[in-house]
Image: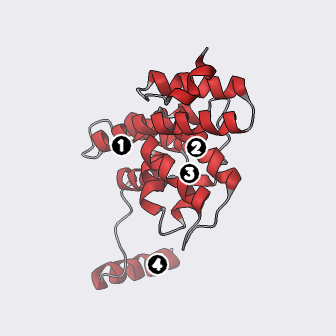
Amino acid sequence: MFRRVIAAAGLCSAMLAGSVTAAPDPEALLREEVLAATWPADIVRLAGDYRRRFPRAPGAGDVAARGAAAARARAALETKDVNLPRDAFVAAAALPALRADAERALLADAAAAGRIAHAYRDGGADVAAEPLRYLAWLHYAAALGGPEANYELSRHYRDQGQMPMAAKYQSRAVELGVVLPRELDSVRK
């Protein structure tokens, strides 16, 4: 009993001195976890948990929008042709030149994914040229509906002599509004 009194007295004096802070807000902690997640499937799971636990919280709309965008990204990542590793968004975000695009690509921005692909294709001051990462990001951008990425993949596969794959991406590019140069007309037939 004496120990409890001493502990309670110590806690009271610490609270009066301002060294003990209030318990963390579970809603704010979960919202921060949603914002810090670096894989679309994790964002979808955490956003769903947030909506169930805090449906009327001030951040519910933002979390729901982030979850919906991440769901589109997750669907693209689950397509057969996309082989982007789980750490791809973290690796891209670690490079200052790609940080902003990595966050956008995490939330299903095809143009941002395409810019990351080109950074890995071309290399540069902060980014080493990595052909495999280039193709992985380009496939992701194409799966997100990027017309330029689909066209670029059609050219890549055509150059590799893989005509069925070239035709697949070419037809997607055309569906997305790309006007093909005459030299590619034979692939469409």
> Do residues under tags 2 and 3 come within 8 Å of each other at their CB atoms?
yes
Q: Earlier in the sequence, mark 4 or mark 3?
A: 4
User: By what rule are the colours in the image chosen?
Assistant: secondary structure
Depth check: give the residue in front, 134 or 83.
134
Give residue 133's mark.
none
Depth check: give the residue in front, 34 or 154.
154
Q: Quadrant of residue 123?
A: bottom right
**Amino acid type, mark 4:** Ala
Q: Earlier in the sequence, mark 2 or mark 3?
A: 3
User: For the residue labelled by badge 3, is the local secondary structure a helix, a strand or a loop?
Assistant: helix
Give residue 138's mark.
2
* Residue located farthest toward the front when viewing the structure as drawn: 182
**Amino acid type, mark 1:** Val
What distance separates the C-alpha of mark 2 from that of mark 3? 5 Å
> Do residues under tags 4 and 3 come within 8 Å of each other at their CB atoms?
no
Label 4 belongs to which residue? 7
